């Protein structure tokens, strides 16, 4: 499947599919930024956003992609967000640490 097929719903208008195709390059850059932030240790999506100047929503989308790709995993830890809610602490998968260190 193409990036656009996995990032736009089947019933979305053609403009959404076109937007997903355009976002492919940007998403690739964002995935690298998120993975590099995690090379320093486990972080929540909010913490990643604070460190790398991506919005929370950009981070959560890329964390989802990286999880699907096997690059990041749930550490099992939880930390409070600025809103006081528990959030997953993400970390690089063991086989990815050297790639981003």
Image (cartoon, rainbow, N blue to C red):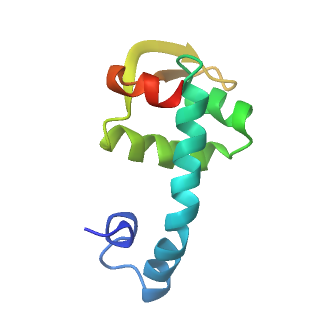
- The location of residue 52, given as percent across then percent down, is 71, 37
Of residues 77 and 81, the one drawn nearer to the viewer in this rendering? 77
Residue at image location 48% in from the left, 78% down from the top = 16
Of residues 80 and 63, the one drawn nearer to the viewer in this rendering? 63
- How many numbered circles are shown? 0
- The location of residue 69, given as percent across then percent down, is 32, 43
Q: Quadrant of the N terminus?
A: bottom left
Of residues 53 and 85, the one drawn nearer to the viewer in this rendering? 53
Establish if 2 lies above or below 74. below
Which corner quadrant of the image does residue 5 belong to? bottom left
Residue at image location 44% in from the left, 23% down from the top = 97
Q: Quadrant of the C terminus?
A: top right
Name the outermost residue toward the left. 1
Establish if 61 lies above or below 14. above
- The location of residue 75, given as percent across then percent down, is 40, 16
Residue at image location 63% in from the left, 20% down from the top = 84
Relative to 56, is 101 on the left or the right? left
Residue at image location 51% in from the left, 55% down from the top = 28
Establish if 91 lies above or below 54. above
Of residues 17 and 32, the one drawn nearer to the viewer in this rendering? 32
């Amino acid at each position: 499947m193409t990036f656009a097929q996995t990032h736009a719903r089947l019933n979305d208008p053609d403009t959404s599919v076109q937007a997903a195709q355009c976002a492919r390059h940007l998403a690739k850059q964002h995935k690298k930024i998120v993975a590099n932030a995690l090379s320093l240790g486990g972080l929540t999506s909010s913490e990643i956003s604070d460190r790398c100047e991506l919005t929370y929503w950009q981070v959560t989308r890329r964390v989802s992609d990286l999880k699907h790709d096997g690059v990041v995993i749930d550490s099992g830890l939880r930390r409070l967000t600025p809103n006081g809610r528990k959030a997953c602490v993400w970390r690089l998968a063991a086989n990815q640490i050297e790639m981003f260190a």
